[in-house]
């Protein structure tokens, strides 16, 4: 046996010796307290944005190139007073040095947060909305739904939930009434099933934004696929965000889908693993 082979054998023997049957030498990663954050871009008059916690590297999620009406998933975030900045996403050094948001937020361990950048960046009329997400535990016989009004320039909204047909009469009573800009409704529960959210200016019947909720998908255990939350999947929690149209001529998207206000759904909780 040459010296190289002997070295590998000795190294292997040392590794085996280090991992005794009693597990006393096994090193486990420590469990640290964590909050959970996700980012939402609701600014209708500027380009995509980059999000960064700048006070530490570990457990500091980022979002790069987050477009208008875009969002990130919940990510583990170190709790405490955290320094967050939002920049324009650009290759021009002069542009990316312009901070749109420069703020400190306080996060509590074990708590979920939605951080919404809203308002207009022109005239420095934008701000960060911090929503503490008290996501309910939903039995599999129900789903939970709420609405967040992120529609800059829109009046208070009445939010109706009904069958999927867009031409059906509105229900007699809104699910969430007179929802103000930058407000989040409480969660309401309903039986699983397809539905459409339609938003009107409060007290009126003309629909300003509407969309069918995503149905979700059942688990496929044989393929190790867990269930995806949605309107037909009991145990789901969903937020319907009301967004404004993009500002004409701005760096926000200008395609047809962005020339009117819109409802965009984000899944807050997927059905429990079976």
Image (cartoon, helix red, strand yellow):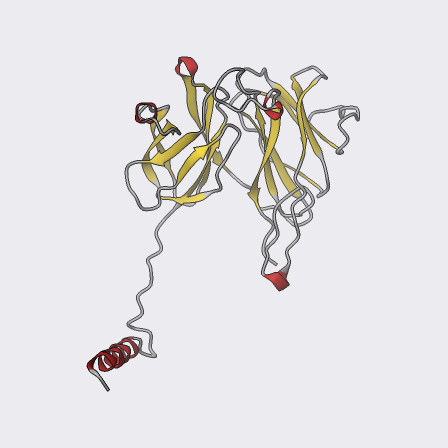
Q: Residue furthest front?
A: 2
* Residue 234 percent location from the top left of the image: 66, 47
Quarter placement of the C terminus: bottom right
Q: Residue furthest top?
A: 123
In the rendered image of this protein, does residue 262 appear above or below residue 272? above
* Residue 104 percent location from the top left of the image: 33, 30
Quarter placement of the N terminus: bottom left
Q: Residue at x 43, y 18 (%)?
A: 121
Q: Residue at x 31, y 46 (%)?
A: 58
Counting every numbered tag in the picture gives 0
* Residue 42 percent location from the top left of the image: 50, 26
Front residue of 269/93: it is 93
Front residue of 114/61: it is 61
Q: Residue at x 39, y 16 (%)?
A: 124
Q: Residue at x 54, y 20 (%)?
A: 246
* Residue 169 percent location from the top left of the image: 79, 24
In the rendered image of this protein, does residue 222 appear above or below residue 193? below
Front residue of 61/188: it is 61
Q: Quadrant of residue 24?
A: bottom left
Q: Residue furthest left?
A: 3
Q: Quadrant of residue 166?
A: top right
Q: Residue furthest bottom?
A: 1
């Amino acid at each position: 046996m040459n010296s190289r082979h002997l070295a590998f054998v000795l190294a292997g023997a040392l590794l085996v010796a280090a991992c005794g049957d009693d597990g006393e030498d096994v090193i486990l990663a420590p469990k640290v307290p964590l909050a959970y954050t996700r980012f939402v871009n609701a600014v209708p008059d500027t380009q995509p944005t980059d999000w960064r916690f700048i006070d530490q590297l570990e457990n500091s999620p980022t979002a790069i190139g987050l477009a208008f009406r875009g969002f990130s998933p919940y990510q583990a975030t170190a709790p405490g007073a955290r320094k967050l900045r939002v920049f324009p996403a650009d290759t021009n050094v002069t542009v990316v040095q312009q901070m749109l948001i420069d703020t400190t937020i306080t996060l509590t361990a074990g708590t979920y947060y939605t951080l919404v950048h809203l308002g207009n960046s022109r005239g420095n009329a934008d701000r960060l909305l911090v929503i503490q997400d008290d996501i309910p535990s939903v039995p599999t016989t129900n789903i939970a739904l709420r609405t967040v009004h992120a529609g800059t320039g829109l009046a208070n909204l009445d939010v109706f939930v009904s069958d999927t047909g867009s031409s059906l009469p509105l229900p007699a009573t809104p699910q969430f009434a007179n929802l103000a800009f930058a407000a989040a409704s409480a969660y309401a529960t309903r039986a699983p099933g397809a539905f459409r959210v339609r938003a009107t200016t409060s007290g009126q019947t003309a629909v300003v934004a509407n969309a069918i909720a995503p149905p979700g998908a059942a688990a496929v255990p044989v393929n190790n696929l867990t269930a995806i939350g949605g309107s037909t999947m009991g145990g789901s929690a969903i937020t319907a965000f009301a967004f404004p149209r993009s500002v004409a001529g701005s760096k926000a998207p200008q395609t047809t889908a962005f020339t009117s206000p819109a409802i965009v759904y984000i899944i807050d909780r997927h059905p429990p693993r079976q």
